[in-house]
Image (tube, rainbow, N blue to C red):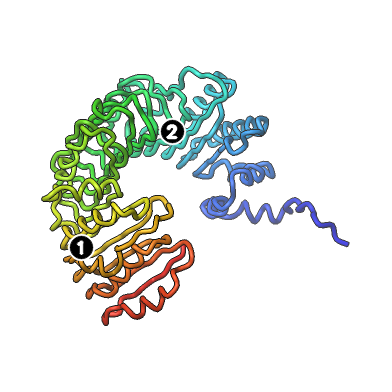
Amino acid sequence: MDRPYELLASPTMSDESMFSNLPEHIVHHILSFLGMADIVRLSFTSKSCRESCVSISSLDFDALQYPTLRGFQDQLMNICERFLSLRNGWKLSRLCVHSQFIENRTESSRVVTMLHMAVGCDVEFLDLEFSQEEEWEMFSLPICIFHCGSLKSLTINMHCLNLKFPSALRFSNLQSLSLKSIWLVDECFGESVSCCKFLRELWLENVCGVENLTIENSNLERFSILYSYHPELCHLNISGQKLIEINVEWRFKSPLSKSVKISAPNLRYLKWVGYITGHNCLGSLMHLERVELFLQCRDLDTTQELPNIFRSVISTKDLHLHDHGIMNLHNYDPLPISSENVQCLSLSIQKFEDYLVPAMASLLRRFPKLKALDIKYSLPIRTTTMSGFDKVYWQSQHLEFIHQLESVSIELLDGETELELAIYILEHATKLKKMVIFYSLSLPSGFISRIGKDRMSSSPVVVLKKI
């Protein structure tokens, strides 16, 4: 009987010669399909294989994948350091180093050494992630990172460690900067980023330690700032002539002490999630194409800011709201937004309630130019039993857009309201081309037959998708 497991034989001399004689770009292409652990093993088989492995354009050393294997982490970081030292000037496209600081000085010194060697290899994309088990005062990026002319993208995740961002230094040619879970030591971060003349993308996620963040960069195109909760940040000021995308997620306790100011005359996409701040100034946003506003009024005094926010996004054709936005917006007459411009409307709701459906119908009546409608659940909560919101109810709302509606997507949970709305649209939307119906459980009994019965003569395509 054959043994169930057999060790693979060592490569023969002819096999090794065949591999070594391949053109370098083909060898590197073959190695790109291997994980880093396999590349490390291959590097020990022969001198030529070591040279091929060491010279690959992308190195990925993730010691955080093995949180309980401290000895293996040390070995992996030693190999990373050795690979970099053996490159002999070979250009490095991407370096990923994920490490855990336990013996602080030793580990941080090792990382700094590797960063120096990466700069010497003209690294273009740098991905750093550090965590710790003990208290640690601060980590500072080596000065060579800021002067590295080849560096285009820098990603740092510090798991709430302190990072010193020197105000006197600027990145030479950096185009993309992403910071996550970092405590900045001083307030000069905004000033430093504002002076990076080649920066195109800036992503800040749970970056703490800054009370006033002002970024004024004429070349910045995309900006994202995400805070699940951040009591320290009070004032957010973003300015850029070339900004086309802004994504803000910000929650806090005291809205009256917070402010948001945006100056981006060429902005095309705006997403704002969280609480309304006490003071807002969005300026003139006349080129907006898509707006997602998922805002809540944490304080009654901030409700007066809502009309100003909606007036700032008056030009958008694609509007996304959640149930709080529906309830707030339908109360205004006239609407603080140009209903004539909106052609695509997406409504994200927690559940259909008796109070929400009339508000939704009232809002839909005031968007006469709609061509696309999307209704989905933000949280799949079971709906309560409701009455009166059947097909006849929707017909009584005299939805003007129904005769030019072209596409619809709607999610069914287990309530009748969504079903009746879908049937009403199928029966009255003369220009409807496609309806996508998402469902998680079984479809209501008789649903398929009702679709076939109530379709218009134009026969739109109806797609059923289980999620």
Instruction: Return the residue nearer the eye: 292 or 9.
Output: 292
Relative horizontal placement of residue 253, taking residue 39 as reference (left or right): left
Q: Mark 1 is on which residue type?
A: Leu
Q: Which mark is residue 422?
A: none
Q: Which of 433/125 is in front?
A: 433
- Which residue is at the front of the view, 130 or 443? 443
> Which residue corresponds to mark 2?
156
Q: x, y percentage for residue 84? A: 54, 34
Q: Is tag 1's residue or tag 2's residue first in the polypeptide sequence?
A: 2
Are there few (<14), some (14-19), or many (20+) residues within 10 Å of tag 1? many
Please name the residue shown 13% across and 58% down the image. Answer: 340
Q: Name the residue that disc number 1 marks.
A: 370
Above-or-below relation of 173 to 458 = above
Binning the other alpha carbons within 10 Å of mark 2 as few (below 14), some (14 to 19) or many (20 upward) gives: some
The residue located at (54%, 55%) in the rendering is 26
Q: Position of residue 413 (x, y in %)?
A: 42, 60
Alpha carbon distance from label 1 to label 2: 43 Å
Judged from the image, the secondary structure of the residue bearing numbered disc 2 is strand
Question: Nearer the viewer's eye, disc 1 or disc 2?
Answer: 1
One can see residue 150 in this view: no
What type is the residue that disc 2 sits on? Answer: Ile
